[in-house]
């Protein structure tokens, strides 16, 4: 019997390779929880693409509330941090906490995230944060570095195959501003 895994999804492109690699060993439900995404139209576009991918891959998908105010409160005081710094760590923590809470409330044995597909994300930081949160909730956090074995390249190829929208910034107001 496969373990039930709640997999935090930040966007459809990163979900592709993650689901492909984890599906053989886990009973996956995808969880889209990203109140960090700005503007709200971008949030809805990414959610819509994730819903389409979940249908195409026959993977269950649930999503959390979009509360950009709660997320902004979480990163208040960290606005001037560089991309990849303390603000990002607070963001990872916020989203993984929400994922763990949902997982605990709905009987999942483990949780993880697709965030480590990105070559711009520090897998060690994400895995440390996830493991700490998992201990607090009595859940296993599946530590991954999905960019290994050309995970990012595979996500690009699968995104083309599924004709997915690929965003050009992480998602938050600050990463969007940094891109300009």
Image (cartoon, rainbow, N blue to C red):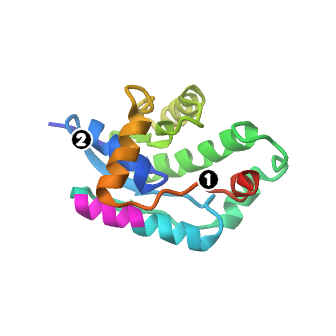
Label 1 crowd (10 A; few <14 / some 14-19 / many >=20) = some
Q: Position of residue 129 (x, y in %)?
A: 58, 33
Of 111 and 19, which appears nearest the observer? 19
Q: Is residue 170 among what the camera can see?
A: yes
Q: Position of residue 159 (x, y in %)?
A: 37, 52
Which comes sooner in the sequence, label 1 or label 2?
Answer: 2
Question: Which contiguous range is marked in magenta?
Answer: 49-56
Figure check: 2 above or below 60? above
- Dividing the image into 4 quarters, which one contains the C terminus? bottom right
| Chief secondary structure of the magenta portion | helix
Q: Is residue 6 among what the camera can see?
A: no
Of 65 and 50, which appears nearest the observer? 50
The residue lying at 73 percent from left, 36 percent from top is: 85
Residue bearing the label numbered 2: 23
Label 2 crowd (10 A; few <14 / some 14-19 / many >=20) = some
Q: Which quarter of the picture shows residue 121?
A: top right
Q: Which quarter of the picture shows residue 73?
A: bottom right
Q: Residue furthest bottom?
A: 41
């Amino acid at each position: 019997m496969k373990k039930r895994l709640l997999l935090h999804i930040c966007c459809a492109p990163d979900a592709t390779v993650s689901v492909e690699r984890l599906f053989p060993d886990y009973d996956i439900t995808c969880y889209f929880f990203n109140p960090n995404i700005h503007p709200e139209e971008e949030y809805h576009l990414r959610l819509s693409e994730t819903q389409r991918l979940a249908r195409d891959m026959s993977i269950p998908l649930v999503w959390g509330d979009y509360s950009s105010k709660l997320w902004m409160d979480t990163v208040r005081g960290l606005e001037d941090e560089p991309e990849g710094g303390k603000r990002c760590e607070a963001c990872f923590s916020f989203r993984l906490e929400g994922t763990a809470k949902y997982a605990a409330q709905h009987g999942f044995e483990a949780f993880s995230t697709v965030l480590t597909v990105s070559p711009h994300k520090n897998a060690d930081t994400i895995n440390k944060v996830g493991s700490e949160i998992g201990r607090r909730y009595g859940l296993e956090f599946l530590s991954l570095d999905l960019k290994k074995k050309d995970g990012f390249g595979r996500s690009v190829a699968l995104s083309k195959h599924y004709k997915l929208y690929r965003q050009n910034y992480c998602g938050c107001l600050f990463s969007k501003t940094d891109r300009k």
